């Protein structure tokens, strides 16, 4: 979580030192949307650690939306001004909605950017997690039927679910995947506007972040294997406590690794 929080501030601060030719409104609007990516991903991690997988996916999905808005504001001064002024009047509000059509922006990313299909697929995956259709299959869905009254009730139990820790770990890495997808999309925009800056600073930094991400995946893979691998089984309270200890240990390791970066 510290890495997700710090990396956006570092990039925006460095980006401001040598920006492409942007207007003040584009810098302000795009920068605010970029910082919103950081806030949403950070909140996504916090809600995940509390066990709210659907909410975590919702925040990660909104982070992708904010990335699209940031690049839109950086790319078009008119859009940036519409973002900054949307509360001034009904006309300004309508102009803002016209300049930031979310699904059209996502579609444009998919069609026109190298990383577009990746971020679009990530957005679709997260959308499935927000709604109960996928989660209901992953969590333990208990059906209790009273034979006399013929009534059926459903009880969703999050922390006593089969493979509960595995689902939390999966979602954790989907947040990291979203984090990387956002950064690489922004890097692609920077590459189009300032190739030397992108090659010298932005892309090498992202490569280091990606390596750290892959290292974390291996740590989690080993950690989840100690709990029982991928085989379906009943996970008891002791296993969940063990998973939480692993999470806390990894957080401390991640903090040290982030400081090295």
Image (cartoon, rainbow, N blue to C red):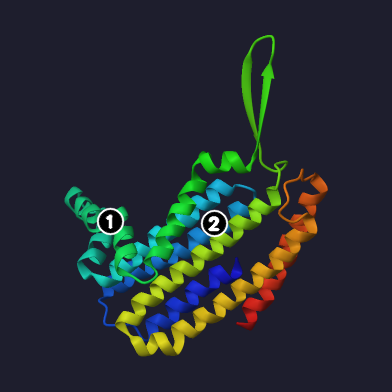
Residue 54 in the image, given as x and y percentages of width and height: 54, 46
The disc placed on residue 43 is 2
Q: Residue at x 23, y 51 (%)?
A: 93
Image quadrant holding the N terminus, namely bottom right
Q: Quadrant of residue 197?
A: bottom left
Residue 260 in the image, given as x and y percentages of width and height: 64, 83
109, above or below 139, in the image: below
Residue 254 lies left or right of residue 233; in this view the side is left
Cα separation between marks 1 and 2: 26 Å
Residue 69 in the image, given as x and y percentages of width and height: 33, 62
Q: Residue furthest front?
A: 231
Eye-nearest disc, 1 or 2: 1
Considering only order in the chain, which callout, 2 or 1, is on the residue closer to the N terminus?
Answer: 2
Residue 146 lies left or right of residue 204; in this view the side is right
Q: Residue at x 61, y 56 (%)?
A: 170
Residue 50 lies left or right of residue 134; in this view the side is right
Residue 141 in the image, given as x and y percentages of width and height: 64, 34
Residue 158 or residue 143, whichever sits in front: 143
Q: Which residue is mark 1?
A: 104
Q: State the SS at label 2.
A: helix
* Local crowd size for mark 2, using a 10 Å CA cut-off: few (<14), some (14–19), many (≥20): some
Q: Residue at x 48, y 47 (%)?
A: 128
Q: Residue furthest top?
A: 148
Q: How many marks?
A: 2
Residue 224 or residue 14, whichever sits in front: 224
Image quadrant holding the C terminus, namely bottom right
């Amino acid at each position: 979580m510290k890495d997700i929080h710090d990396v956006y501030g570092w990039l925006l601060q460095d980006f401001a030192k040598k920006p492409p030719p942007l207007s003040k409104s584009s810098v302000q609007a795009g920068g605010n949307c970029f910082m919103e990516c950081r806030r949403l991903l950070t909140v996504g991690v916090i809600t995940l650690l509390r066990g709210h997988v659907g909410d975590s996916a919702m925040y990660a999905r909104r982070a992708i939306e904010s990335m699209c808005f940031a690049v839109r504001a950086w790319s078009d001064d008119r859009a940036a001004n519409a973002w900054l002024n949307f509360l001034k009047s009904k006309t300004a509000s309508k102009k803002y909605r016209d300049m930031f059509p979310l699904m059209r922006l996502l579609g444009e990313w998919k069609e026109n950017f190298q990383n577009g299909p990746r971020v679009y697929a990530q957005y679709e995956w997260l959308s499935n997690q927000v709604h109960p259709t996928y989660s209901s299959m992953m969590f333990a869905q208990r059906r209790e039927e009273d034979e006399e009254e013929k009534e059926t009730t459903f009880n969703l139990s999050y922390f006593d679910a089969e493979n509960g820790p595995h689902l939390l770990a999966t979602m954790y890495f989907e947040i990291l995947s979203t984090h990387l997808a956002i950064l690489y999309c922004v890097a692609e925009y920077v590459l189009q506007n300032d190739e030397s800056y992108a090659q010298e600073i932005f892309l090498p930094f992202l490569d280091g972040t990606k390596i750290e991400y892959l290292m974390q995946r291996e740590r989690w893979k080993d950690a989840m294997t100690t709990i029982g691998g991928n085989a379906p089984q009943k996970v008891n309270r002791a296993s969940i406590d063990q998973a939480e200890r692993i999470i806390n240990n990894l957080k401390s390791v991640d903090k040290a690794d982030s400081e090295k970066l």
